């Protein structure tokens, strides 16, 4: 019988295969963009929704905004020492 694997072993393997996962992700996203050129909504709710690749571009922009907000605003708040109450 096989012993249960540890989480650390799984994370090490995932880290080793990161480039493969990244390539797979980009391939899937590329397929979605190409499909969006041919499959469009019949009744878009607003003008942008009818443009090919709109949702992919929207998702990319939203992700970039979230990363910037987290790195510039949220991380400094979370990275403070526990005994720091904000007063100088």
Image (spheres, rainbow, N blue to C red):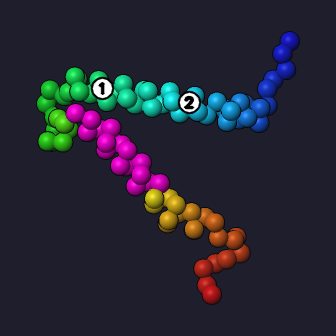
What is the spatial separation of the Cα atoms under label 2 and label 1, in whole angstroms?
20 Å
How many other residues sit within 10 Å of disc 1, few (<14), some (14-19) or many (≥20)?
Answer: few
Q: State the SS at label 1.
A: helix
Q: Quadrant of the N terminus?
A: top right
**58 to 84, vertically: above or below:** above
Where is residue 79? Give x, y as percent: 63, 66
Q: Main secondary structure of the magenta part?
A: helix
User: Does residue 7 show up?
Assistant: no
**79 to 60, vertically: above or below:** below
Where is residue 29? Give x, y as percent: 40, 31
**28 to 47, vertically: above or below:** above
Q: To which residue does mark 1 refer? A: 34
Q: Which span is picked out in magenta?
A: 52-67
Where is residue 27? Give x, y as percent: 44, 27
Q: To which residue does mark 2 refer? A: 21
Q: Quadrant of the C terminus?
A: bottom right
How many other residues sit within 10 Å of disc 2, few (<14), some (14-19) or many (≥20)?
Answer: few
Tell me the quarter of the picture where residue 87 sits. bottom right
Residue at 48%, 31% (x, y): give it: 25
Residue at 37%, 44% (x, y): give it: 60
Q: State the SS at label 2.
A: helix
Tell me the quarter of the picture where residue 37 sits. top left
* Front-most of residues 43 and 30: 30
Question: Residue most toward the bottom?
Answer: 88
* Front-most of residues 39 and 18: 18
User: Does residue 88 show up?
Assistant: yes
Q: Is residue 70 left or right of residue 31?
A: right
């Amino acid at each position: 019988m096989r012993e249960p694997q540890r989480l650390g072993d799984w994370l090490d393997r995932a880290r080793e295969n990161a480039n493969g996962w990244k390539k797979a992700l980009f391939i899937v996203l590329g397929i979605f963009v190409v499909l969006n050129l041919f499959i469009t909504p019949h009744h878009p709710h607003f003008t942008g929704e009818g443009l090919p690749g709109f949702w992919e571009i929207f998702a990319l922009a939203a992700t970039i905004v979230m990363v910037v907000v987290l790195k510039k605003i949220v991380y400094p708040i979370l990275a403070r020492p526990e005994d720091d109450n904000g007063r100088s």
